[in-house]
Amino acid sequence: MWNAEEIASQIAVIDGKEAPDLIITNATYLHSILKQWKTGTIWIKQGRILYTGERMPPLTEGAELIDAAGKWIVPGYIEPHVHPFQLYNPETFAQFAAQHGTTTFLADNLMLLMSISQEQAFTLLDELKELPFSFYWWARMDSQTNLQNEAEVFAPEKVEEWLKRDDVLMGGELTGWPRLLKGDPVMTESLQKAKQLGKKVEGHFPGASERTLARMRLLGVNGDHESMTADEAEARLLQGYAVTLRESSIRPDLKPLLEGILEKELNVFDHLMMTTDGSPPLFHEDGVMDKCIRIALEAGVDPIDAYQMASYNIARYYDIDDLHSVIAPGRFATLNFLSDIREPNPTDVLSKGVWLKRDGQARMEFNKADWSVFLNFAPDFELTQEDLTATEPIGIDMLNDVITKPYETTVDLSAEKLEDAHDESFLALIDRNGKWRVTAVIKGFARSVQGLASSYSNTGDIILIGKDKNEMLRAFRQLKEIGGGIVLAEDEKVLCELPLSIGGSLSDQPIEVLREQEREFKQALSDRGYEKGDAVYSLLFLQSTHLPYVRVTQLGVADVMRNKVLIPMTER
Ligand SMILES: Nc1ncnc2[nH]cnc12
């Protein structure tokens, strides 16, 4: 973090031989270890807290002086479970989240693994390190779908390269845990490397039984974020799991979870963390970790506990509290200034000594990472109606936005159009390189979406859904035209489009712009009979085998629980 010369200069400030860069006077700040509000002066130099206490520095020449009277200062918020590719990219997400006080991220590397080489990914991670945010990463051990080149992408020696990085704090999330439980040698080897390197491992165990939790604990898993009730949270705590409570667009469970924990009088707040678990832009309209803190305060959680579940508890669990979440010498000067303890959205945000927000106004824009490493989305093939015509009457029935089950369809698969009277649509997953396709039917997505094409998916392959094969083909052509994203077509014209110009997977737009595009897309779907929760997740998880019960994948339509292919993929 700081070299010998910088440290000497920092000590020179304590010795009265140099002045700090920034002095915060009349500070009332949360001391994470004492769990008390302390008052005093904070000295900062080179983005580092040098001193907190009663004294002013001997030399103040040239230092910026901030009088924090009337403000409450808390450590910057940490989002421990970020999927930084929910239409946004890591940089645009961080830029938005920082305006709400979230300036440290533990982020999923899945999209990087799906889209670019390891070397390009590491270059991107190093570029992001230059920004006044703190990015940390996960090392995924499975693709959470049936990937044709799974063995290559998730080879243990590649996973190990990720795990060896000092900014990789976690192995997982372990969406492929059933494979691990069956003794899959590849995942077992990756998991053991994570343990040997002293990394935490995060599970993904929705609805898991006590025995599954025990088995996964014995295999080396440390944490889980899938509790949907206070009983489930307690069951995980009982088995020594680190529990992260979730408020997300498909699982907005935080308030009942916290109310249940309070009701049970479980005095466990020092061991709890919170996350928004990769929600799309619209969900974040009212914030990121400040949104979770607000919910905790409303649920009746003690303010200090509420703030610590979004900062210190996370830093301590992931062993980064030497640099984060303690307002004391040696840590990053990453501080949020609050107008009131009960208003977690800060008026001012300091991140690694850089002002990102002052008096409620954003201070700077970033455009640092070189996203050109993401290959442009430019399919060089055409599709025909045959690509959209299934041969087997097997379909995917949506029970909610992300849970599905197989069913037998009676629609005429060879028809060009399906009527709006029912909620079945044609479905196809097309290799983004045009080499293969999987064609089926989907029920419960919408009633009158004529043609949807999306390069936003778990693997970057192309999803086509619709009632009208010609409109689906039109949407696909427009998708190529705009370089990837999500397109709706209807009555021989393009209805709306959400461009994802970074590889067809990520947007380069600020969240505020992207959010309006998402709103328009979701409104158009809703007007045409999409009645589930979050359509962005419906698209993302169509391929994801970490949720029950049937998925369209690169190997075909797969029955997840029986690990069986119901409709094989077709070579093109
Ligand atoms: N497992 C997952 N993969 C990608 N995005 C997610 N958002 C929430 N869970 C996710």
Image (cartoon, rainbow, N blue to C red):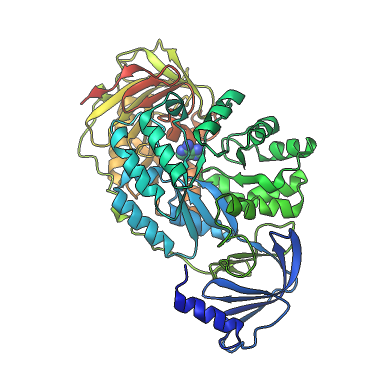
Q: Nearer the viewer, residue 49 or 549?
A: 49
Residue closest to the eye, 110 or 376: 110
Q: Position of residue 277 (x, y in %)?
A: 54, 42
Q: Could you tell me how many numbered marks the image carries?
A: 0
Q: Is residue 438 above or below residue 164?
A: above
Judged from this view, the residue extending furthest toward the front is 196
| Quarter of the view holding residue 54 | bottom right
Question: From the viewer's perspective, is 440 left or right of 330?
Answer: left
Q: Nearer the viewer, residue 248 or 389?
A: 248
Q: Is residue 403 above or below residue 80?
A: above
Residue depicted at x 38% and y 21%: 558
Residue 131's x, y, as percent? 45, 64
Look at the image and tell me whether residue 87 can be seen: no
Q: Is residue 545 visible?
A: yes
Residue 311 occupies quadrant: bottom right
In the picture, measured across the screen, residue 306 lies left or right of residue 421, that is right
Q: Position of residue 404 (x, y in %)?
A: 48, 22
Q: Is residue 95 left or right of residue 211?
A: left
Rendered residue at 44%/29% (across/down) = 180
Q: Quadrant of residue 35?
A: bottom right
Instruction: Quarter of the image for the C terminus: give it.
Output: top left
Tell me where residue 306 appears, x and y as whole percent.
Answer: 70, 51
Residue found at x 31% / y 39%? 153
Q: Residue at coordinates 50% horizontally, 59% vertically from top-left?
A: 134
